[in-house]
Structure formats: C-alpha cells, structure tokens
Image (cartoon, rainbow, N blue to C red):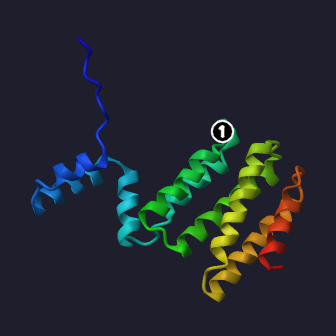
C-alpha cells in the first residue's frame, strides 16, 4: 500500500487556523512572533513606523555584509545584503525608505570596493543592478529628497570608475538614460 503523500502547509492552512482565534489569541501569537527573533521585531517596527530609525536594523545588515571587517576575516554576501532590502519592502515598502536602503547599499559596496580593492565581477554586477534599482526608486521621490539621493548615487558612480569591469561606465549609461546628470 502506497504511503499518502504529505504536503507542506500553505498560507490557506494557517489562515484557517487563525480564523479560530479571538482577538486576544491573535495578539498572543503576534507577541510570540515578536519575541521569537529580531527580524520579526524589525518587521513589525517598520510596518507600524515604531521607534526612531526603522531603517537602522536593515542598514546594519547591509553594512555588515557589504563592508566586512577584514581583521575578523569576514566575508561579503550580496545575497544577505539584498535580503535586508527585500525584508524592508515586505514590512513597509515606503519609497523613501527603499531608496535610502538601496543608495546605502550602493555606497557601502562601492566604498568597500574602493577602499579594499574588491575584484569580484559578480559583486560589481550586483552593485550596478542595485544602482539601477536605486535610481528608479529615487526619481519617484519628492524633488528635494530626489536630489539628495541622486547626488549620493552620483558620488557612487564617480568612485566606481576606479574598479574596472566597466562599472562606472554602466552607471554613466544608467544615469544618462534616466535623464539625470
């Protein structure tokens, strides 16, 4: 006799179980999730706009993985840094916050590369892709904030001419296509 195939629970399954809870029960589940890990806390803080700087935990992750401490022999991880931005997008997704995190990503990746002589084409390709995304989000912001973001991206573009692999040239083309600079 064949063993029945087990399926993984889905959101529909969870939603059905949640429907069985009253308000106090739902609060209890959310409290347990909040206490379970810092990622859940950051998510809820960002979603509800709580605390001083809701971007700080996301920036700390980006900073750690794009500007590792060479003395501690730490590695870089583009995927982990990008995941922080994706998590913020799910939590709050405010264009100004997304632009800030994306531009910060570009600044940290370019700054580390410039300071320590990074020689990783994949890392540079990810930087150019993030630069393009940051540019797209930044141009949607209000004029004053847009100009600040574009100036910061222009500084990234400028130092990226030091890397080779056509990084600075790619950024020049992206800026030209966007109609800025």
**Are there few (<14), some (14-19), or many (20+) residues within 10 Å of tag 1?**
few
Q: Is residue 35 left or right of residue 132?
A: left
Image location of residue 87, percent across then percent down: 47, 56
In the image, 128 versus 149, the foreground residue is 128
- Check the picture and name the quadrant holding the N terminus: top left
* Number of numbered labels in the structure image: 1
Please identify the residue farthest to the front as the structure is shown: 1
The spot of residue 100 in percent (x, y) is 60, 70
Residue at left offset 65%, top offset 38%: 75
Where, by quadrant of the figure, is residue 62 drawn? bottom right
Compared across the picture, whether 80 is left or right of 44 comes to right
Q: Secondary structure at mark 1?
A: loop
In the picture shown, does residue 171 fall above or below 33?
A: below
Looking at the rendered image, the quarter that the C terminus falls into is: bottom right
Residue at image location 43% in from the left, 72% down from the top: 52
Q: Which residue, given by chain and number where applicable, does mark 1 sit on?
A: 75
Residue 114, located in which quarter of the rendered image? bottom right
Q: Is residue 53 left or right of residue 107?
A: left
Instruction: Tell me what residue is drawn at x 68 percent, y 76 percent.
Output: 149
Where does residue 12 sit, x and y in percent of width and height? 26, 50
Which x, y percent locates residue 24? 11, 61
Q: Give the residue furthest to the bottom.
A: 143
């Amino acid at each position: 006799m064949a063993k029945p195939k087990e399926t993984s629970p889905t959101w529909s399954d969870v939603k059905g179980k949640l429907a069985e809870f009253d308000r106090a029960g739902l609060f209890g589940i959310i409290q347990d999730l909040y206490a379970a890990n810092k990622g859940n806390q950051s998510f809820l803080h960002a979603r509800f706009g709580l605390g001083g700087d809701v971007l700080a935990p996301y920036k700390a992750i980006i900073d750690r993985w794009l500007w590792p401490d060479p003395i501690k022999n730490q590695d870089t991880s583009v995927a982990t840094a990008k995941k922080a931005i994706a998590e913020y997008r799910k939590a709050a997704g405010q264009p100004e916050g997304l632009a800030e995190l994306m531009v910060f990503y570009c600044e940290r990746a370019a700054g580390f590369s410039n300071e320590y002589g990074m020689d990783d084409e994949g890392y540079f390709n990810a930087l150019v892709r993030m630069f393009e995304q940051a540019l797209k989000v930044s141009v949607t912001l209000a004029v004053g904030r847009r100009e600040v973001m574009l100036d910061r991206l222009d500084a990234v573009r400028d130092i990226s001419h030091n890397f080779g692999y056509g990084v600075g040239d790619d950024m020049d083309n992206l800026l030209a296509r966007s109609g800025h600079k």
